[in-house]
Image: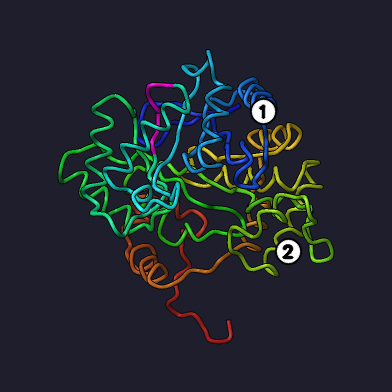
Amino acid sequence: MKYRKLGNTGLIVSTVALGTMQFGSKMNAGNLDQKATNTMVKFALDQGINFIDTADVYSLGESEILLGNALKGIREEIVLASKVRLPFSNNMNRSGATRVNIIRGIDSSLKRLQTDYLDLYQVHGWDSNTPLEETLCTLDNLVRQGKVRYIGLSNYSAWQAATAIGIQEREHIEKFVTAQLYYSLVGRDLEHDWLSCAAYHNLGILVWSPLAGGFLSGKYDRKNPPTPGTRFADAGQFVIFDKERAFSIIDVLRILAKRHEVSPARVALAWLLSQPMICSVIIAARNIEHLQDNIRSVDLELSTEDMEQLNAISDPGTPYPKWMVLQLDQAEDPRPAILEPDRFANGGPWHDLRGTKWNK
């Protein structure tokens, strides 16, 4: 196993974390019972994983209960994260990032997990119906009370994260240290704004659904769609991507997997682990065989040629205003090449658009 710091903190976490959406029977995402949960948690810890991520809403609390039982006697040995914000019932006040819901959420999660603190507590999504200051001050209080060590966000836009951090800095309250976001070879939208935002604010990125709901396992192609009983077929296409482009990515993954004598999933995860600002990739398997294969991705070293092939086939393009920002700040301004010559050794991060011919 390999390890990195959790964002801009001194806490050390494994580069792959154990996800827990598959624990419990109320989300049709794995249906693992207590025995299977115990087995999977023990195996993960034996492989060097020290970071486990869950959420109150996973199987409506059942995932946290099963995980809490599995961690009896060893809770202090791991970094434990959970989340709050998504609807937990039809009660409208049991949803959102309000003071009431966050306080109820942390107390309930601690009880289900059988612990008196969480290492990381994350807001599961943006709440447009609650003043941001209310959310942030409540999270700060949880840290001061000792119920939470660090706080993070999940599923925010880059501008929303920057706005929140600006308020935290202005009010001198606890700042977000991580951002849990979707990122994969078939979903590289983070590269438009988020990676730069994370680098500027020293936010560590935690990746959810790194295999796009199981699609990047390489089991599916144009002639072999997901079959009933598989996670991808049962849960549906939870993450959005262009299917035709995705199948082309699978073709390249299979070529590289054969080259390295590994699974396509391992190649896809190794690509993610090589990206900037990633501190941990969350993997969630329904059986030990798949979990073990995912874990082994930390030891796979992709060559420059491998990376170029993957980057080319999965390139999402560069939308405005990012291409204009790069053009002005990296191509036309002479200072970056002088101050950071290593980044420009092979032409720099952006191809200068000046002089580009129409037929090229």
Label 2: few (<14), some (14–19) or many (≥20) C-alpha neighbours in 10 Å: some
Kindly identify the amino acid type of the residue bearing the numbered disc 1: Met
Q: Which residue is mark 1?
A: 40
Q: Residue at 70% across / 54% down in the picture?
A: 234
Which label's residue is closer to the chain start, 2 or 1?
A: 1
Residue 207 lies in the magenta-colored region: no
Q: Residue at 22% across / 44% down in the picture?
A: 168
Circle 2 or circle 1, nearest the eye: 1
Q: Quadrant of the N terminus?
A: top right
Label 1: few (<14), some (14–19) or many (≥20) C-alpha neighbours in 10 Å: many
| Horizontal arrangement in the rendering, residue 277 relative to residue 138 (left or right) | right
Q: Nearer the viewer, residue 304 or 61?
A: 61
The image position of residue 138, as x and y in percent, is 25, 40
Task: Please say if the residues under marks 2 and 1 sit with CB atoms less than 8 Å apart.
Answer: no
Kindly identify the amino acid type of the residue bearing the numbered disc 2: Phe
Residue farthest toward the right in the current orientation of the protein: 223
Above-or-below relation of 39 to 271? above
Q: Which residue is mark 2?
A: 247
| Horizontal arrangement in the rendering, residue 320 relative to residue 264 (left or right) | left
> Which of the 4 image quarters holds residue 337?
bottom left
The image position of residue 341, as x and y in percent, is 41, 50
Q: Residue at 15% across / 46% down in the picture?
A: 170
Badge 1 element = helix
Residue 116 lies in the magenta-colored region: yes
The image position of residue 324, as x and y in percent, is 37, 71
